[in-house]
């Protein structure tokens, strides 16, 4: 299947950003030299070279964009290679904001303060949470990865299929493999709150979400990862300083979020509520979202006193749990859907029903995890080798050992993600349809 890449500019209301002026966000549509507030404009689609996806040279007159010294960032659609499944990415400007909340917020919690001034670099972020349609593509890699491993151990067989042979011949030296999630132990439990293609994927561990971004990065040639906690809140706030991206009135939450009062005990198709000012859907409710950070109730206190950079603000995990999840979910009250609300993972409690030893490094089994998913970001500046390892790989020894044990026992699968992988997987699927 030919991989079609579409670069597009989508506008909910026109927003022009100029890097270097983060506190002066220009919220206008400029038409014929005149500014009209909150004017809706139609989508504009542009074909673009893969290497420049999301960057254009000329600012579109009628669409939201972010001006940077590397080009003009616009929204784009990423097609997962080898499929027709897409992800829509939204440009986010550089800026400085206050992470956390103050005691003036009636629902303020001690772990949300004191507020910290954080400098954010430009990036793209998914307009929606990762859906089952998107995550199932990654889940289906399990069988193909196993076949590739067997063929790699018997290299002469790989030659029989020229596409698979091409994959092996073009493996770059020194590139680590990516794992795929194992088949679900009990799909009826995982899919209890919904499994339709448009519903958000849930119950994956943070490690599995990170591996998804590594896999997607390898096959597209673009650096995707989970957002940091600061990036997540910056994008969720979208220039606002109120409790929610739409204001302080909790009575309006139902217009923007699926939460305890309206979700009917299940997830809902993404993008069906109102977006925030930058065009992000479901930052409040539906599912809470993994970020890169480990949870520490006193982390913001440790950063107090001076502005910090994006990477200085990250609390890199040093233990298995807890880790930060943001945004609130379908079973949460409105106060947990606030832009500044922090929640933490409880990994042992979320794996009580897992019969495996070691416990799965890819899946949780309990109801609480049915409210946990993720969305992805792509930084404007590519990641260096050290950063890639930090944002993609297992970061504590317990996860590393669990993955290694699974692979050695044949209960796991891995392959090197490159641009040749989708074609090789497609060729294997034609030979042995799954």
Image (cartoon, rainbow, N blue to C red):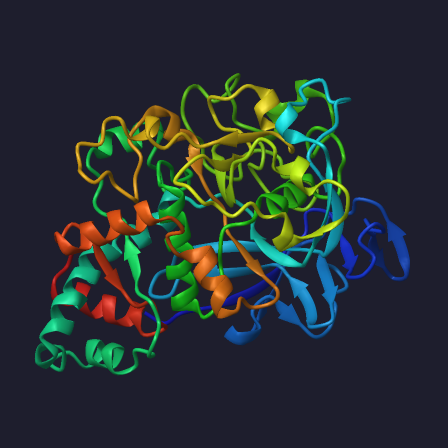
Furthest toward the right, the residue is 34
Question: In the figure, 190 relative to 178: above or below?
Answer: above
Q: Is residue 181 left or right of residue 395?
A: left
Residue that appears at 39% across and 40% down: 320
Quadrant of residue 355 in the image? Answer: top left
Q: Is residue 34 left or right of residue 150?
A: right
Q: Report x, y in % for residue 11.
A: 68, 52
* Quarter of the image with the C terminus in it: bottom left
Quadrant of residue 249 in the image? Answer: top right
Question: In the figure, 171 relative to 337: above or below?
Answer: below
* Closer to the camera in the image, 242 or 293: 293
Residue that appears at 59% across and 21% down: 334
Q: Report x, y in % for residue 261.
A: 53, 16
From this viewpoint, is residue 285 visible? no
**Count of residue discs:** 0
Quadrant of residue 121 in the image? Answer: bottom right
Q: Report x, y in % for residue 315.
A: 55, 45
Question: In the figure, 164 relative to 406: above or below?
Answer: below
* Quarter of the image with the N terminus in it: bottom left
Question: In the figure, 47 relative to 275: above or below?
Answer: below
From this viewpoint, is residue 354 visible? yes
Residue that appears at 57% across and 31% down: 297
* Closer to the camera in the image, 191 or 205: 205
Q: Report x, y in % for residue 87.
A: 48, 54
Residue that appears at 35% across and 31% down: 194
């Amino acid at each position: 299947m030919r991989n079609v890449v579409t670069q597009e500019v989508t506008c909910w209301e026109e927003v022009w950003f100029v890097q270097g002026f983060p506190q002066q966000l220009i919220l206008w549509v400029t038409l014929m030299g005149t500014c009209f507030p909150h004017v809706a404009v139609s989508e504009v689609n542009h074909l673009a070279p893969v290497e420049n996806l999301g960057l254009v040279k000329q600012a579109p007159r009628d669409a939201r964009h972010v001006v940077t010294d590397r080009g003009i960032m616009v929204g784009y659609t990423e097609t997962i290679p080898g499929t027709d499944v897409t992800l829509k990415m939204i440009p986010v400007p550089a800026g400085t904001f206050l992470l956390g909340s103050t005691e003036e917020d009636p629902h303020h919690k001690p772990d949300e303060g004191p507020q910290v001034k954080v400098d954010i670099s430009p990036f793209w972020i998914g307009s929606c949470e990762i859906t089952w349609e998107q995550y199932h593509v990654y889940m289906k890699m399990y069988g193909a990865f196993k076949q590739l491993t067997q063929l790699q151990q018997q290299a002469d067989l790989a030659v029989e299929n020229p596409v698979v042979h091409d994959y092996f011949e073009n493996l770059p030296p020194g590139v680590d493999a990516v794992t795929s999630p194992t088949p679900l132990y009990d799909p009826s439990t995982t899919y209890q709150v919904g499994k339709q293609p448009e519903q958000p994927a849930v119950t994956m561990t943070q490690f599995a979400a990170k591996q998804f971004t590594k896999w997607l990065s390898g096959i597209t040639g673009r650096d995707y990862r989970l957002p940091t906690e600061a990036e997540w809140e910056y994008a969720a706030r979208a220039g606002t300083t109120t409790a929610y991206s739409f204001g302080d009135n909790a009575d309006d939450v139902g217009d923007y979020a699926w939460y305890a009062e309206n979700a009917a005990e299940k997830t809902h198709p993404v993008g069906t509520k109102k977006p925030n000012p930058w065009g992000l859907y479901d930052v409040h409710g539906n599912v809470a979202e993994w970020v890169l950070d480990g949870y520490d109730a006193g982390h913001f206190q440790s950063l107090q006193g001076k502005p910090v950079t994006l990477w200085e603000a990250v609390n890199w995990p040093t233990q298995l749990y807890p880790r930060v999840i943001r945004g609130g979910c379908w079973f949460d009250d409105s106060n947990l859907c606030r832009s500044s609300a922090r929640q933490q993972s409880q990994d042992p409690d979320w794996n009580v029903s897992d019969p495996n030893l070691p416990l799965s490094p890819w899946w949780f089994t309990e109801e609480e995890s049915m409210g946990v998913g993720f969305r992805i970001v792509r930084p404007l500046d590519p990641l260096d080798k050290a950063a890639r390892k930090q944002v993609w790989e297992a970061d504590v020894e317990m996860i590393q050992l669990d993955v290694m044990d699974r692979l050695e026992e044949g209960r796991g699968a891995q392959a090197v993600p490159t641009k040749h992988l989708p074609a090789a997987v497609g060729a294997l699927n034609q030979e042995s349809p799954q």
